Amino acid sequence: MTDHDEIPDRDAGINGYQKIDRYNPELIANLSGHYHEVLKEIGEDPNREGLLKTPERIAKAMLYLTHGYDLDAKEILNSAMFKEEYSQMVIVKDIEVYSMCEHHMLPFFGKAHVAYIPNGYVVGLSKIPRVVDVFSRRLQVQERLTNEIRDCIQQTLNPIGVGVVIECRHLCMSMRGVQKQNSVTTTSAFTGEFLKEKTRTEFLNLISSRLS
């Protein structure tokens, strides 16, 4: 994470692999203290062997799952914009999405499909999934996540149009509440040419197809 100090994880893995995470030690200690109290409040013993390091692990996990707050999606796009006279649809589909519902802080996950029609500029293809990751690694609702991805691409690239479709499963629905394990939520957001039925239909057909 940006401006966070290095804290080495001393648990060596296969072939001596050592994982290095970047976290702020003071922030980790503060969050760990809160999670220590949470464990007590739910009836657990945070001092038993299996839970001794759990508050610290949760703190590190939460900082990773929300590291999108430290990133600038527009800056990411601006770093890889190129002039190009290409005016057909560009699609990056099946982008993995992992986010946290802001209502219950439970995960939701699935796929994002993003398209844009260039208007003099294209962007490095890897930057589209990174934009998705920036906004998904924050506390979210799927509807806002969809709009934020759309708006960032539209405002930064100024394309002829942007289309975003996200399909996700929400653990707040499958683990609690209505407990509907197989339900999928689909959201979409469009600008410009994608507001026209013909262009939108082409996009939807292309993300639904599977290349052989």
Image (cartoon, rainbow, N blue to C red):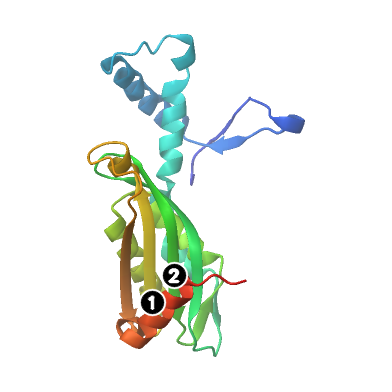
Q: Which mark is residue 114?
A: 2
Above-or-below relation of 112 to 190: above
Cα–Cα span, label 1 and label 2:
8 Å
Quadrant for the C terminus, please.
Answer: bottom right
Q: Are marks 1 and 2 in contact (CB under 8 Å)?
A: yes
Residue 49 coordinates in the image, percent (x, y): 48, 10
Residue 203 coordinates in the image, percent (x, y): 42, 78
From the viewer's perspective, is 188 left or right of 117?
Answer: left
Amino acid type, mark 2: Val
Residue 185 coordinates in the image, percent (x, y): 31, 56
Residue 160 coordinates in the image, percent (x, y): 39, 85
- Residue of label 1: 162
Bin the neighbour count of mark 2 within 10 Å (Cα to Cα): few under 14, some 14-19, many 20 and up: many
For marks 1 and 2, the one nearer the N-term is 2
Q: Which quadrant of the figure has residue 85?
A: bottom right
Q: Which quadrant of the figure has residue 20?
A: top right
State the residue in front, 162 or 108.
Answer: 108
